Image (cartoon, rainbow, N blue to C red):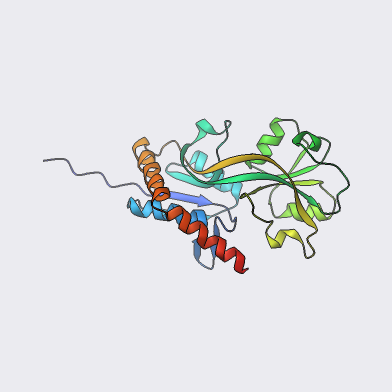
Amino acid sequence: MAAPRAPQESLFIVAEHSPPASMKEGDEITGRETEKIRDMLGRLAIPYKIDILPWKRAYTMAQEQKNTCVYSTSRTPEREKQFKWIGPTDEAEWVFVGRADHKFQLRTLDDARSLRIGTYHGDARDDFLRARGFNVEPALNNASNPKKLLLNRIDLWAVGMRAGASIPAEFAGDKGEIIPLLTFHRVKVYLACNPSVPDTLVERMNTTLDAMRRDGTFAKLERKYAELEKKK
């Protein structure tokens, strides 16, 4: 007789508040990528807890804490060996956003070398630009960057956005004072898990996400949130 299967350990899933991908509405944690991950874990009957935290805290927890995963995490060469990767769950563009009345030219990434670029601690865009010698000014809270931009304390804000997405209304200003200026990089984003998560479980999660892409679940959720964005 086969030995009984050991119970599956619970995963702790964390994300930042980043509508419409991940957000907290009342007591409910929802969002486009949240729903993809909940569906995947539900199909596999994996017990989990989920929370919305500041990005730096969420990211550090996934690095250091057993059975903890963070989304939506840009997969970069610098991060590759720090996590086990499930996905991609989505793709993103890295965009320089600036004031609509800016005076400088910005046609290539290199044109930004003399400019002050707002980022935030622990973010992949901060790591990317810092490693290439750009003048980055990281904030503790990403929401402070549009305010700094409007006050001329920075020249650019490095933002992650879906292709074709607009700047969230709460950041764009009442009269569209903040606009996208240049897409400088493209990445895929994942559920990034602490190395303690077993390889067999990572494989099962990736296989399930592949099935969700094929059966139309991803497309359905993306249409749902696109419609919700149009209604705002």
Q: Residue at x 82, y 40 (%)?
A: 115
Q: Quadrant of the C terminus?
A: bottom right
Q: Count all numbered tags in the image, as a single digit.
A: 0
Outermost residue, right direction? Answer: 103
From the top left corner, tell me how far across and down residue 2 is, in percent. Answer: 14, 40
Q: Quadrant of residue 226?
A: bottom right
From the top left corner, tell me how far across and down residue 205 is, in percent. Answer: 38, 44
Task: Tell me if residue 7 can be seen.
Answer: yes
Q: Residue at x 78, y 46 (%)?
A: 156
From the top left corner, tell me how far across and down residue 99 is, in percent. Answer: 81, 53
Horizontal arrangement in the rendering, residue 133 relative to residue 37 (left or right):
right
Horizontal arrangement in the rendering, residue 218 relative to residue 149 (left or right):
left
Q: Quadrant of the N terminus?
A: top left
Q: Residue at x 52, y 44 (%)?
A: 61
Task: Tell me if residue 31 can be seen.
Answer: no
User: Toward the viewer: 70 or 57?
Assistant: 70
Q: Quadrant of residue 187?
A: top right
Horizontal arrangement in the rendering, residue 100 relative to residue 45 (left or right):
right
Horizontal arrangement in the rendering, residue 120 relative to residue 28 (left or right):
right
From the top left corner, tell me how far across and down residue 42 is, in percent. Answer: 36, 55
Outermost residue, left direction? Answer: 1
Vertical order, 81 against 159 (above or below)? above
